[in-house]
Amino acid sequence: MKKILFLILPALGLLTVGCSKMKIEDFEGKQPKFVLEQYFSGKTRAWGIVKDRFGNIRRQFTVDMTGTWDGQVLTLDESFNYDDGETDNRVWKIRKIGAHDYEGEAEDVVGKAVGKAYGSALNWSYILALKISGRTWNVTFDDWMFLQPNGVLFNSAEMSKFGITIGEITLFFKKPDEKSQASVEDIFAVAAE
């Protein structure tokens, strides 16, 4: 009996460590510092993919964004273009409510999005009313953004329903300037050939 407990207890410890969740506070002091309202002011472009729960890529898309910061509210107008020809638009109203805290609202967000930023990272939690096959599903998002050198912003969002992961969205953002925009477009053009 003692031998069995001796083998089981370390295994349980490994399971506990493996199931731990990342904490936004762990990014305190990481550089470059991500300030949401500064980064998204002006024009921004993003490229993304949507994976289902099995890891299959279901959609690809681009997003063109225009952000306006008035000192209290960031208005972020997003225009989505999907690879199947569908288009969509979302307008966020985001308020900075504390040194590390944000609240966001959009027409298809149920209630308010809650965000926390530390160092180079930001974590959003929200419920989005997604239209899937003619029905509307309230899907929970655990959305992480990580600012990289040279203004590249990496974004990974896990989607879940009833606590079960149903998919993942991965994007990267870049502020448009002629040199970097051309090189990113060239990369995607070559990849598509």
Image (cartoon, rainbow, N blue to C red):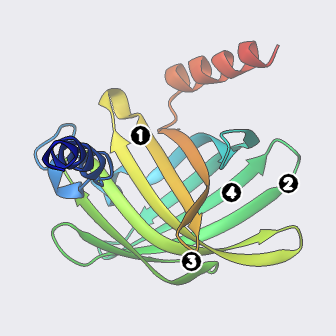
Tag 2 near tag 4, CB within 8 Å: no
Does residue 74 appear in the picture of this structure? yes
Disc 4 from disc 1: Cα separation: 18 Å
Q: Quadrant of residue 3?
A: top left
Residue to which mark 4 is pinned: 79
Tag 2 near tag 3, CB within 8 Å: no
Comparing 176 with 138, the one in front is 138
Q: Is residue 84 left or right of residue 150?
A: right
- Residue at horizontal 52%, vertical 48%? 43
Tag 4 near tag 3, CB within 8 Å: no
The secondary element bearing badge 1 is classed as strand
Of discs 4 and 3, which sits in the foreground? 3
- Residue at horizontal 32%, vertical 55%? 122
Residue to which mark 1 is pinned: 153
Disc 3 from disc 1: Cα separation: 21 Å
Q: Given the current orientation, which residue lies at the most extreme bottom position?
A: 111
Count neighbours of disc 4 (C-alpha within 10 A) and say few if under 14, some if 14 to 19, many if 20 or more: some
Disc 2 from disc 4: Cα separation: 11 Å
Of discs 2 and 4, which sits in the foreground? 2
Mark 2 belongs to which amino acid?
Glu
The secondary element bearing badge 4 is classed as strand
Mark 1 belongs to which amino acid?
Leu
Mark 3 belongs to which amino acid?
Ala
Q: Given the current orientation, which residue lies at the most extreme left position?
A: 29
As drawn, the label of residue 86 is 2
Q: Position of residue 79 (x, y in %)?
A: 68, 57
Residue to which mark 3 is pinned: 106
Disc 4 from disc 3: Cα separation: 13 Å
Tag 4 near tag 1, CB within 8 Å: no
The secondary element bearing badge 3 is classed as loop
